[in-house]
Amino acid sequence: MFFDYYYILWVLPAVIFAIWASARVSTTFQKYSAQLSHLGLSGSQAARKVLDASGVYQTKIEKTGGSLTDHYDPRTNIIRLSDSVCDRTSTAAIGVAAHEAGHAVQYAQGYLPIKIRNAIIPVTNIGSRLAIPLILIGLLFAGEGGGLGNLAYLGVLCFGLSTLFQLITLPVEFDASRRALRALESTHILTGEELYGARKVLTAAALTYVAALAVSLTQLFRLLAIVNRRNGRR
């Protein structure tokens, strides 16, 4: 009977970290949702000011359903802000909205990491769909000859593309938060403790991307270890 101790030793701690990071985002956002900005600007108004301060006038801002479903869509050049952010005047809402505005500024200014991330998305999507089937086929035929066992390594390589995507995502997200906080401070949208609250929310959100990379990396190492162990039985 196969016991996947690689998962227990490597992946499970990363998964627990990811769960904790996700919970921390929710609690931190909830905490600073009670801290209102002195100007009384809503998330959408703050995002507009951040965009205008960077000379990005064509990006539109729309409201979308849900909580913390905020995102920037580069295909339509639209920032979509959730119910918990769009019309709220808290430092938490303003921080999240400004972060999404930071992404729009990245696109407008041709920020290199985001260009790289966009370029590998199609390949990453294909790789993520092929990874597990290739690994399973390779493991099934390991030791049978004909080179079919090597398909497992190709599957691991395909999985590695998603890990690469997570890795490139980190500087993109960190830079968007940096741009957001800098704009919020320079335009005096938030000051003092208000800026501190927004920074805490964005820092908590950044941890979720670190956790996602940790899970992906440990899964990659686990899959490679499983394939190596199986091929070592030839």
Image (spheres, rainbow, N blue to C red):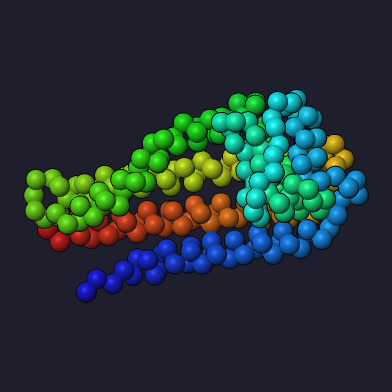
Residue 74, percent across and down? 58, 32
Residue 195, percent across and down? 81, 49
The picture quadrant where one finds residue 3 is: bottom left
Q: Is residue 3 above or below residue 223?
A: below
Q: Residue at x 79, y 55 (%)?
A: 197
Q: Residue furthest bottom?
A: 1
Residue 150, percent across and down? 19, 47
The picture quadrant where one finds residue 171 is: top right
Q: Residue furthest left?
A: 145
Q: Residue at x 78, y 29 (%)?
A: 52
Q: Nearer the viewer, residue 177 or 48?
A: 48
Quadrant (top left, top right, bottom left, bottom right) of the N terminus: bottom left
Q: Residue at x 14, y 54 (%)?
A: 141
Q: Is residue 130 above or below residue 75?
A: below
Query: Is any part of residue 94 visible from this angle?
Result: no
Query: Is any part of residue 73 visible from this angle?
Result: yes
Quadrant (top left, top right, bottom left, bottom right) of the C terminus: bottom left
The picture quadrant where one finds residue 208 is: bottom right
Q: Is residue 122 above or below residue 87?
A: above
